[in-house]
Amino acid sequence: MFTFLLAIAPGASTHVHCPIGDQVVDDGGYPMEYKGVRFATCCAHCGGLFQADPEAAIKRDTNGHTIGIGLFDPVDGKRIVAKSSVGSSEYKGVRYYFHSKANRVAFSMSPPSFSGGPLAESLVCPVDGIEIKRQHDAFGYLDFKGVRYYACSAKCLASFRANPVVDLKVTVAAVQMPEAEFKVTNTNGEVCPLPKLSGKG
């Protein structure tokens, strides 16, 4: 089986596309976060469709386009931005950035091991018990026993990595299925209501 993995070469297209309508959105559009990846749709209607079934949206044919940007280095689990990275790789429509060349190499050896994420997550820091508003506000995450736990600081992430059983203070109620949080206001400050979806009210 061949794995599609693309290192971004100089001069290559860096545009980000709507995962539903395929239009270029880049830093505009209607942003949302899902499983540690930032997606953006071209309109409120596409945003509602993505929110209704994000898994179906990200698994559809992307026509070779980038549809998401990883908010974290997928190998060390720490928050990252493009300008502080040493490089990036594309896998199944998502562009991942890395803190080190070693992390990038590790990812290239087995992308499925570092992408996707568990079927449950918690936005309550497992050490300090602080609620984290959005995924991009977390310092990093650790996947433990089928749950992705987001940590609020470097200290908490290191502590949790060292002894996840002892430091785990998250209640069962804080663990939930991943959801795509749709921003009703786009990056231009324009407010658009979610469309009515079958079975969604």
Image: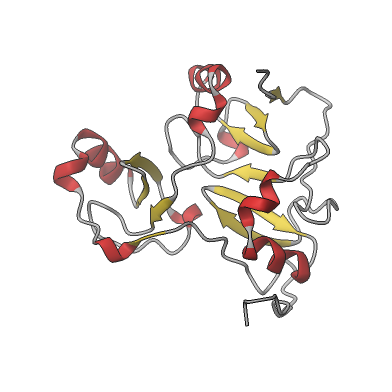
Between 101 and 117, the one nearer to me in the picture: 117
The residue at the point 67 percent across, 52 percent down is: 56
**Number of numbered labels in the structure image:** 0
**Relative to 193, residue 50 above or below:** above
Residue 130 is situated, as x and y percent measured from the top left of the image, at 29, 62
Location of the C terminus by quadrant is bottom right
Between 181 and 104, the one nearer to me in the picture: 181
**Relative to 40, residue 117 above or below:** above
Q: Is residue 86 left or right of residue 186?
A: left
Q: Quadrant of residue 133?
A: bottom left
Q: Is residue 33 left or right of residue 173?
A: right
Residue 57 is situated, as x and y percent measured from the top left of the image, at 69, 52
| Colouring of the image | secondary structure
Q: Is residue 23 left or right of residue 82?
A: right
Residue 121 is situated, as x and y percent measured from the top left of the image, at 40, 53
Residue 45 is situated, as x and y percent measured from the top left of the image, at 77, 70
Q: Residue furthest bottom?
A: 201
The residue at the point 70 percent across, 24 percent down is: 4
**Relative to 156, residue 180 above or below:** below
Q: Quadrant of residue 154?
A: top left
Q: Residue furthest left?
A: 166
**Relative to 191, residue 163 above or below:** above
The residue at the point 40 percent across, 44 percent down is: 140
Location of the N terminus by quadrant is top right
